[in-house]
Amino acid sequence: MRMAHEAGAIHFLAYSASQLIVKQVEGTYEAKEESMIQYLQQIKELKTSFDHFQITQIPREENIKADCLSKLTTALEDCRTRHITIQYLPKARALLVVQPITTRVDWRTPIIRWIEGGHLPDNRWKTARLKAQATHFLIQAGTLYKRSYTHPLLRCLSTEEGVHVLQEIYSGCCGAHAST
C-alpha cells in the first residue's frame, strides 16, 4: 500500500485468499495478536490516502500469483544474509538498500529530456522515433516508467541496474528457481 501511495495511486484494490485478513481489514473480525493490531493500524492510516480502497477475498485456487509469491518468500527464508530490497512493517526491521541516483547518459536520457524539457535530437529521424517511443513512458516522482496495458507501470533501469538485477536473480539461493 505504501508503494502504491508513493507512486501516486488514488485507487487501491487488493485481493487476498485469507478470509481472516479481509474480515479484519473490513472491521468485521477483531484482531487479537499485537502484531496484527499494528498491521491493521498502519492499513487504517494508509487507507485514508486513497480516494477508493477495496480489499476482496478470492478463493486460494484463483490466486495463483500470490501463491507463487508466498512460495518464493518461503524459499527466501534461508537468504537472510543477501541484500534484497523488501519492505517490511516495523516489527521485522528489514534492511533497506538504496541505490544512488546517477546522472550518466544511458538509453533513458533522451526520453527523460524530451518528457521533462522538450529537448529533441538534431536528426529528424531520431526526433520522430523519440516522439513515438516517448508516448509509452511517464515520469513519476523523478523515476522513468514504461506504461503497460496489462501490467502495472514498469520501472526503467539503467544498464548497470539491469545487470545487477539479473545477477541477483540468477545467483545465490534464487538461481536454482529462476528458470522455473
Image: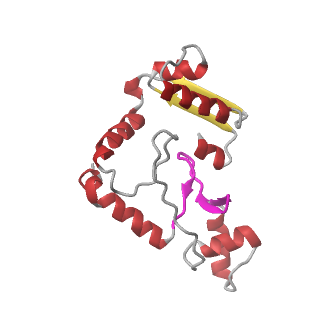
Q: Is residue 119 left or right of residue 13?
A: right
Furthest residue toward right: 117
Please say whether residue 49 is one of the residues in the magenta stretch: no
Q: Is residue 152 left or right of residue 176?
A: right
Q: What are the residue bounds of the magenta stretch?
A: 137-157
Please say whether residue 154 is one of the residues in the magenta stretch: yes
Observer-nearest of 55 and 146: 55
Observer-nearest of 62 and 9: 9
**Residue at screen point 61% across, 67% down:** 133
Q: How many marks?
A: 0
The image's colour scheme reads secondary structure
Observer-nearest of 132 and 33: 33
Q: Residue 97, relative to residue 55: is it above or below?
A: below
Coordinates of residue 161 in the picture (x, y in percent): 46, 68
Coordinates of residue 43 in the picture (x, y in percent): 60, 32
Furthest residue toward top: 28
Q: Residue 108, relative to residue 165: is it above or below?
A: below
**Residue at screen point 57% across, 74% down:** 102
Q: Is residue 74 left or right of residue 42?
A: left
Coordinates of residue 149 in the picture (x, y in percent): 57, 48
Q: Is residue 147 left or right of residue 114?
A: left
Coordinates of residue 4 in the picture (x, y in percent): 61, 44
Which image quadrant: the N terminus? top right
Furthest residue toward bottom: 122
Q: Quadrant of residue 37?
A: top right
Q: Residue 106, relative to residue 63: is it above or below?
A: below
